[in-house]
Image (tube, grey):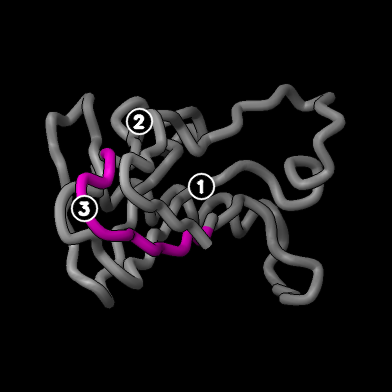
Amino acid sequence: MLSYDRFGHYAPHYDFLNFSTDSDNWWYKTYGDRLATALFIIKTAEKGGGTVFPKMKVVISPEPGDMILWFNANIKFEQEDLSFHGACPILAGRKIAMSLWIRCRQHKDLKCQMNDEILSHELNDIFRNFN
């Protein structure tokens, strides 16, 4: 859950972690990098608080109930440069949102019968359709 009051903001950043394969980060080792981000908008500020993508020169000003989805990685599972984003300052009111990171590996409780080779092939097909 994300909550920003007056003057609250989040500086532009990447959600892609880009750790090396020998990283000791448990989340990264277990679930992989952040393939995509879904940002669910619960409450919008009265003024300010948009989601900015500076490299695309875009500010999104969603409504409550909206979801913003973007890919953090490209087809080669490298950082997507255009995913650089941040939360604009709140000038009046309060913004509440929730982030969901879609990771590259399956969750231990959500078993999938596909092997890694098939999964990788199908993800490549999905990405190919976005290019």
Q: Residue at x 28, y 39 (%)?
A: 89
Badge 2 is on which residue?
A: 84
Question: Helix, strand or loop at disc 1?
Answer: strand
In 3D space, how far apart are the residues under numbered discs 3 and 2 (Cα atoms)? 25 Å
Q: Is residue 75 magenta?
A: no
Question: Helix, strand or loop at disc 3?
Answer: strand
- Considering the image in quadrants, where does the C terminus appear? top left
The image position of residue 8, as x and y in percent, is 38, 42
In the image, 126 versus 13, the foreground residue is 13
50 versus 78 height, above or below: below
Q: Which residues are magenta?
A: 89-100
Answer left or right for 39 relative to 119: left
Judged by depth in the image, the label closer to the viewer, 3 or 2, is 3
Question: Helix, strand or loop at disc 2?
Answer: loop
The image position of residue 38, as x and y in percent, is 41, 60
Q: Residues within 10 Å of mark 2 (few under 14, many from 20)?
A: some
In 3D space, how far apart are the residues under numbered discs 3 and 1 (Cα atoms)? 33 Å
Badge 1 is on which residue?
A: 35
- Which labelled disc corresponds to residue 92? 3
Q: Amino acid at mark 2?
A: Phe
The image position of residue 39, as x and y in percent, is 38, 59
Q: Earlier in the sequence, mark 3 or mark 2?
A: 2
Q: Earlier in the sequence, mark 3 or mark 1?
A: 1
Q: Residue at x 29, y 30 (%)?
A: 82
Which quadrant holds residue 105? bottom right
The image position of residue 104, as x and y in percent, is 61, 50
Q: Residue at x 18, y 47 (%)?
A: 48
21 versus 124 height, above or below: above
